[in-house]
């Protein structure tokens, strides 16, 4: 993330965010193991067809989630912070972020980007289970784009840079799902 001037407004602010960053970093690093444990817990309750549809997805889920985290941390977050750090309506107003808002934006943006990268897996599972087809995706493409717009408006910070990044990547993901083979 881009260096900006920050201040801590709480006595334990810096310590708290160092602790939260460590905990969340541990969760991200352990995410492949966590996904495997979730699969080990859920798989006994699934039918054979459901197991075959989901079989072998743990590595893909782990890789996509970690790629999303990296993309959010190294691409989306620096662009957003640079935009907010440089944006001024007047040179008399100085941008000084609190550690709460700065870290909150970094953590939420990277986490939601990681989740967003899992959408192809969700589409794959729904197609394997027969819930959606490529024809269905083609028919409701415009609805999906509106859904991406709404999702981007809800889960991103209220700035155009973050929203446009999410909207563009969402439209690309919708389009790539449509170009896949019909199941």
Image (cartoon, rainbow, N blue to C red):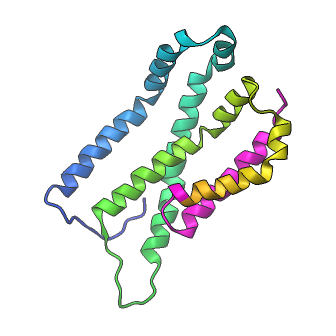
Asked if 115 appears above or below 162 in the picture, the reply is above
Magenta range: 154-183
Quadrant of residue 8 within the rendered picture = bottom left
Q: Position of residue 107 (x, y in %)?
A: 40, 50
Query: In the rendering, at what x and y percent does residue 25 appear?
Result: 36, 39
Residue 76 among those drawn in magenta: no
In the image, what residue occupies the spot 54% across and 12% down?
A: 45
> What is the x, y in percent for residue 95?
36, 77
Q: Nearer the viewer, residue 180 or 51?
A: 51
Residue 21, above or below 27: below
Q: Is residue 73 left or right of residue 12?
A: right
Residue 177 falls left or right of residue 167: right
Residue name at image x 17 percent, y 61 percent: 10
**In this view, 170 is above or below 37:** below
Q: For residue 49, which quarter of the picture?
A: top right
- What number of labels is visible? 0
93 to the left or right of 179: left
Image location of residue 153, percent across then percent down: 56, 61
Q: Quadrant of residue 48?
A: top right
């Amino acid at each position: 993330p881009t260096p900006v001037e920050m201040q801590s407004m709480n006595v334990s602010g810096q310590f708290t965010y160092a602790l939260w960053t460590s905990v969340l970093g541990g969760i991200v690093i352990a995410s492949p193991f966590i996904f495997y444990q979730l699969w080990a817990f859920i798989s006994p309750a699934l039918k054979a067809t459901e197991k075959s549809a989901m079989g072998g997805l743990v590595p893909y889920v782990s890789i996509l989630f970690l790629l999303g985290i990296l993309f959010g941390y190294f691409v989306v977050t620096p662009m957003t912070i640079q935009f907010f750090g440089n944006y001024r309506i007047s040179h008399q107003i100085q941008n000084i972020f609190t550690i709460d808002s700065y870290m909150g934006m970094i953590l939420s943006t990277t986490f939601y980007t990681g989740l967003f990268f899992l959408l192809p897996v969700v589409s794959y599972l729904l197609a394997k289970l027969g819930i959606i087809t490529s024809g269905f995706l083609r028919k409701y493409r415009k609805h999906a784009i509106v859904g991406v717009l709404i999702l981007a408006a809800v889960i991103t910070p209220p700035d155009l840079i973050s929203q446009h990044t999410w909207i563009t990547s969402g439209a690309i993901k919708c389009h790539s799902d449509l170009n896949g083979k019909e199941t």
